[in-house]
Image: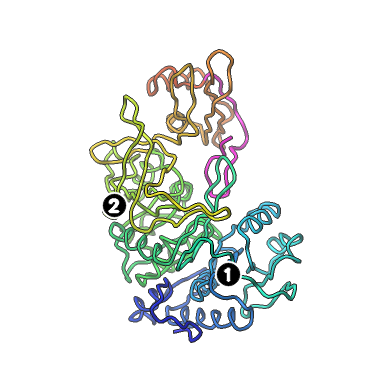
Amino acid sequence: MILMISDLNRINIVDTIRRETASYLSRYAVSQEKKSITYGELLEKVEELSLFLVNECGIEEHYRVALLCEDSIEYIITALALLDIGAVMLPASPSLSSREFDSLCQRMEVNCVICQRSRDIFHKFVDLSEKLSIYNTGKKLQPLYNDGKKLQPFCKEEEVIDPAFIRFSSGTTGMSKGVLLTHSAIIQRTDAADERLKITESDTIAWFLSMSYHFVVTILLFLRRGAHIVLCGDSFPKGAAEAFQRHPPSFLYASPFHYTLMTRNNDFSGELLSNVRMAISTAMALEKKVAVEFMEKFHIALVQAYGIIEVGLPFINHRTDDEYIASVGQILPAYQMKLEDKDLDGRGRILLKGKGMFEGYVSPWQRREEWFDTGDIGEIKDGFLFICGRKKNLINFNGMKIFPEEVEQAMLQFEGIEEVKVYGETHRMYGQLPVAQYTVSGNVKEIDLGALKRFLKERLDIYKIPKEFVKTDIIEKTLSGKIQRC
């Protein structure tokens, strides 16, 4: 136990991990390329760094600390050390621009930044060196900049007892918001997710996603259960295939993008994935085509999960029959859902509540309501939730509502189309016209638009078919991989 922590009754996720992994100290905790670290070694390094952060860096409880690092074993150690001392961790993606990172630091009133000593990341601090204390990760945390001023904890107007984590919302259509989670919420939402995931110390987790966007309900759950996390994202796909040979996975946690590449890449064989008991697909909607092709090659059903930073992982689908592949599943026992403002087809706004909810939004502080409005439109079939689209993305064509996501899913089934974005273009007479941007597969030069329209007529109401099709080289994405909406 860290000696500088005076409250022995505190609620802290790192204490929970220590307690729950006490019997697994000799087992591997995390592997990256050819390097592995046991739970005993991991927790020892966390304790050493925790002491250093307090005694040498002056970081204390409730300080807001941005962590700007590539995914690595060191990232996990640093994150756990920050949580251990009661600091509030703000994960920031290394792919953020300098301007975006500066804006986030100012809006979130960050006290301190911990970053990697790398040229790609270091340049982001040109405008911050006189405002923040900045340290780099490594064998020993060395100060890069320090203006000599004592760090100040953030204002406690929130009256939150055990703040732990501020994650930025995805911001697909506007400015992202800081979502505040507590240690209590993290423990509750990892417990809730594990009712369906059932992670054990025998699991080897193949990890592909960015820890800047996926950490709380996944990495921390895997650590709580004593599982072995294998980081596969650095040199994907070749590096992941090599990692699978060294550490055969039993559990995959990835996006449809990763599963598509595994299906198409010859480095991945059915034998390589023969130990997999569950393959979770998250971060973006799972297309039926991706799930079917993955099943055909590996004989493994992809399980779609519906994760929301404000709520947790309230839906995990367990049905793999044809009609339900696109569903996000039934709601987990720890949560409740209701649909409001339903239309004649039973589609309505998805509202959720349950264990492990966020406390509120930060800077400016806004405490959450009892029910969280996801902004998604959904419908229920036999108790299974289907996401129809985002309310703010709806296209109003002559009084008829069109979900861009529904049209995109239909177009993606057409041979030769790689990616699609459907949006509404303002029209004087009809309000909005549906327009589709699309990219083509590498070996395809042009799409037969007449054939595409006939294809869509068999799958969509006539009014939903885009009135214009625009070929483009790239579909813009957010940092978390979602389509960038206007």
Q: Residue at x 58, y 64 (%)?
A: 155
The front one of 374 and 479 is 374
Q: Main secondary structure of the magenta part?
A: loop
Q: Is residue 115 visible?
A: no
Q: Residue at x 59, y 57 (%)?
A: 93
Q: Residue furthest left?
A: 382
Image quadrant assignment for residue 278: bottom left
User: Could you tell me the amino acid type at mark 2?
Assistant: Leu
Give the mark, 1 or 2, whose residue is nearer the N terminus.
1
Residue 271 drawn above or below residue 7: above
479 is within the stretch colored magenta: yes
Magenta-highlighted residues: 467-486
Q: Position of residue 181 (x, y in %)?
A: 46, 60
182 is within the stretch colored magenta: no
Q: Residue furthest top?
A: 429
Q: Position of residue 11 (x, y in %)?
A: 40, 72
Marks 1 and 2: which is nearer the front? 1
Q: Which residue is mark 2?
A: 332
Residue 167 drawn above or below residue 324: below
SS class of the residue under badge 2? loop
Q: Which residue is mark 1?
A: 63
Q: Position of residue 388 (x, y in %)?
A: 39, 34
Image quadrant assignment for residue 322: top left
SS class of the residue under badge 1? loop
Q: Position of residue 88 (x, y in %)?
A: 53, 67
Q: Residue at x 46, y 21 (%)?
A: 465
